[in-house]
Amino acid sequence: MAQHNERSGFIEEVGLLFEGLGVTRMAGRIMGYLMVSDKEMVSFDELTQVLQASKSSISTNLKSLVHLKFIKPISVPGDRKTYYMLNPDLNWETYFETRFELLKRMLMLFKKGIDLRVNKKDKPATWINEAINFYEWISLEYPKLLKKYRERNNNPA
Amino acid sequence: MAQHNERSGFIEEVGLLFEGLGVTRMAGRIMGYLMVSDKEMVSFDELTQVLQASKSSISTNLKSLVHLKFIKPISVPGDRKTYYMLNPDLNWETYFETRFELLKRMLMLFKKGIDLRVNKKDKPATWINEAINFYEWISLEYPKLLKKYRERNNNPA
DNA sequence: TTTTTAGTTCTTTTATTGCAGAACTATAAA
DNA sequence: TTTATAGTTCTGCAATAAAAGAACTAAAAA
């Protein structure tokens, strides 16, 4: 990192945390920099310099962050540069809804597991049924939870 | 796979799904086999054979599944073999609570981000504050949700 | 039209990780 | 005590993926 201060530490932390979230460490660093930069939007070139990374890596990772709707590209007429900012339209509920897909897949799989068993009352069957019980419940409650948040925020007190 | 039937397909599916959950594909296959096997418990050796995998891979993955409390080793006196079964004591609420840790880490990080900003009212600050708003809310609701499930199941109707 | 700027895309390098094979350990059986 | 069984751990290999480097494209500026 070019500058060694609290911010570069923060940027690395975001990098590591986002890495565990499925994007690359570099994508996380970009998010981190956008969060602590004093500018509202940051150019491609600035990112390569401050993150000491290659253009190719920055390019690829910016694309993926745009695709995930984490950031938003800004183009200004008469300026060939593209700027990027944290996407104000990102809503976290929607992001969390993608997690819901995984829950449903898990549920489907457990049900298929039961179907494939000869004995549907023994210990493994009981284990699977308990999983089904939980996943069925959470698959029902999870969207409710997000809906509740959405309502609270769209109809503020 | 030794036998080509619906079950081996299922086992592969579990492998892929669990892979996305942070364990290895092989660990997922073991889970899959334990789910569709007609036996209540399965030996180390049986796993190497039915999954056509090396002893080392099976050994390592069994250890990790035991550590994650997904499975339980069973030893029988007078029998040197160790058997494994789906852990009846696994409770999914507890498993999901580990997800909660990540939520808290995200929240902490966003708060740190705000602290590091000079301007705490501009667009990036607003973006972070919205994230904080969401994560603060879900960090509060998430444990409630799991508690509700626990109560429903410990006090069955 | 030529040159510079800005960024993309393709190829190569490097690091990580899962798995196999083999050597090793412990324990029960012969 | 020796041998066979059951499983662990260490080493090496193969596959994957992130990032760098370099070649390429598009468009504005000179």
Image (cartoon, coloured by chain):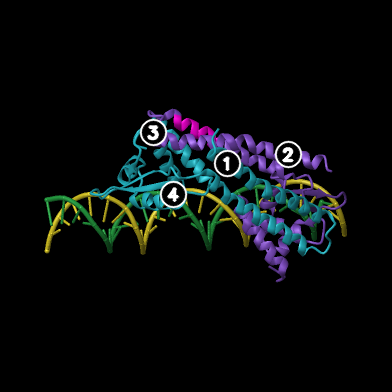
Chain colours: A cyan, B purple, C yellow, D green
Q: Chain of mark 2?
A: B
Residue A151, disc: 1
Q: What predominant SS class does the magenta segment belong to?
A: helix
Local packing at callout 2 (Cα closer than 10 Å; few below 14, some 14-19, many 20+) is: few
Disc 1 from disc 4: Cα separation: 27 Å
Q: Chain of mark 4?
A: A
Of the image marks 2 and 3, the number of the one nearer the N terminus: 3
Of the image marks 1 and 4, the number of the one nearer the N terminus: 4
Q: Amino acid at mark 3?
A: Asp
Residue under numbered circle 2: B148
Q: x, y (%) of residue A100?
A: 61, 51
Q: Amino acid at mark 2?
A: Lys
Say which quarter of the image contains residue B3. bottom right
Q: Are marks 1 and 3 on the same chain?
A: no
Residue under numbered circle 4: A65
Query: Which residue is drawn at the image coordinates 40% and 36% (left, top)?
Result: B123
Residue under numbered circle 3: B122
Is A157 on the left-hand or right-hand side of A79?
right
Q: Amino acid at mark 1?
A: Glu
Kind of element beneath mark 2: helix
Disc 2 from disc 1: Cα separation: 21 Å
The residue range painted magenta reads B105-114
